[in-house]
Amino acid sequence: MARIRRGWSVADLADKARINRNTLSALERGKLGTGAGACPTVLWALGLDKSLEAIADPDTDLHGKAPEASRRPVRAGKSRKVSDD
């Protein structure tokens, strides 16, 4: 959709992203065999690469944070005096 909104052809975007036109077409069709590097490269060529910043942000990992929080102690234990013996 971003390519079409910009009025770019498949060839235009493929050239900007420095990938093959067939790879771009496969990416746009959602083919599973498309290389993983093609998507961020195309987003960069479109100027949309800033949207990738939150992908690997550990603070947005709600599924991972829940088990971590359940393993934390409910309350802190009493402080113990350390003897000088």
Image (tube, rainbow, N blue to C red):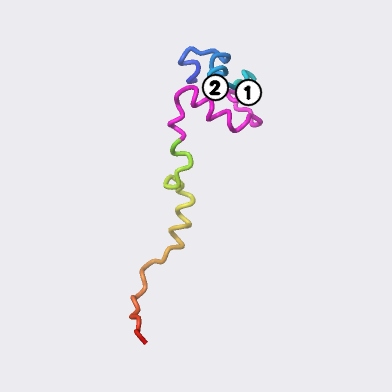
Residue under pointer 1? 23
Q: Secondary structure at mark 2?
A: helix
33 sits to left or right of 75: right
64 sits to left or right of 78: right
x 54%, y 22%: residue: 17
Residue under pointer 2? 17
Whether residue 72 is situated above or below residue 9 in the rendered picture: below
Quadrant assignment, res 26: top right
Q: Residue 67 placed where, x, y %?
A: 48, 57
- Residue 37 located within the stretch drawn in magenta: yes
Tag 1: Cα neighbours inside 10 Å, few (<14), some, or many (≥20)? some
- Residue 67 located within the stretch drawn in magenta: no
Q: What kind of secondary structure does the magenta stretch mostly adopt?
A: helix
Whether residue 5 is situated above or below residue 55 in the rendered picture: above
Q: Nearer the viewer, residue 51 or 84?
A: 84
Residue type, numbered disc 1:
Thr
**Gap in Å between the C-alphas at discs 2 and 1?**
11 Å
Q: Earlier in the sequence, mark 2 or mark 1?
A: 2
33 sits to left or right of 18: right
x 58%, y 31%: residue: 37
Q: Residue furthest right?
A: 33
Residue type, numbered disc 2:
Ala
Magenta stretch bounds: 27-52
- The tally of labels here is 2
Q: Residue 20 placed where, x, y %?
A: 63, 20
Query: The C terminus lies in which quarter of the figure?
Result: bottom left
